[in-house]
Amino acid sequence: MSLVFTPMTEADARAILAWRYEGQYAVYNSPDAALGHDFDPLVELLDPGSPHFAVRESNDATDVPPLGFFGYGSACEVSAAETQGLATPYLLRPDGSATIGLGLRPDLTGQGRGLALVKAGLAYARDHYHPTLFRLYVFEWNQRAIRVYERAGFVAVGQTSFTAPEGERVFIEMTRVV
């Protein structure tokens, strides 16, 4: 599968925000109450300071809804404590590392497509941003995603948590050398 990254458009962002995951994965549905009433996910997806990209297969036209998305920078952090003192938005941390975030359309999950998406997103960042290290955060319960990230070369280096309206959210921090 050859994947193409295009800067996020408003139409792409609206399509992604309409995705609906089932069961425990519904926490990925937008809007997320844990982010507060003032948080606008559309603004975040369109912020060039922490860029997001729509991902399609190379043979898809741009009017075809994206199969996934990939983001880089401050929008992909899970806690203000992780970036205390840094001005946002930002693409790379001062040490040159890139925090990534991604999503796969709900109807495509569980089909073995995640690893290709992760590898393509890392390659895109290497070619365009030249980070020193990749970082991501994943819910501790999301073993399906953790397995994909491990297969892509990420290792767990710690965890972070914060209190959300439904209770504490615990994330595993994973890193990978470029």
Image (tube, rainbow, N blue to C red):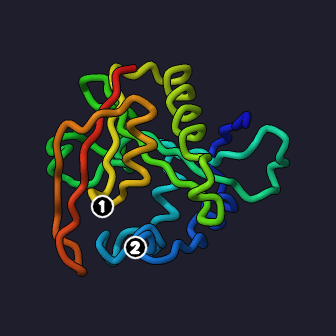
Viewer-nearest residue: 5 or 51: 5
Residue type, numbered disc 1: Trp
Residue on which the image places disc 1: 141
Which amino acid, mark 2?
A: Gln
| Label 2 to label 1: alpha-carbon separation | 9 Å
Disc 2 is placed on an element classified as helix
Tell me the quadrant of the picture where the C terminus can be found: top left
Residue 1 placement, left or right of 129: right
Q: Nearer the viewer, residue 74 or 143?
A: 143
Whether label 2 touches label 1, CB < 8 Å: yes
Residue at 18 percent of width and 45 percent of height: 82
Q: Is residue 122 left or right of residue 176?
A: right
Q: Which residue corresponds to mark 2?
A: 24
Q: Which mark is residue 170?
A: none
Specify the quadrant that holds the N terminus: top right
> 149 or 39, which lies in front?
149
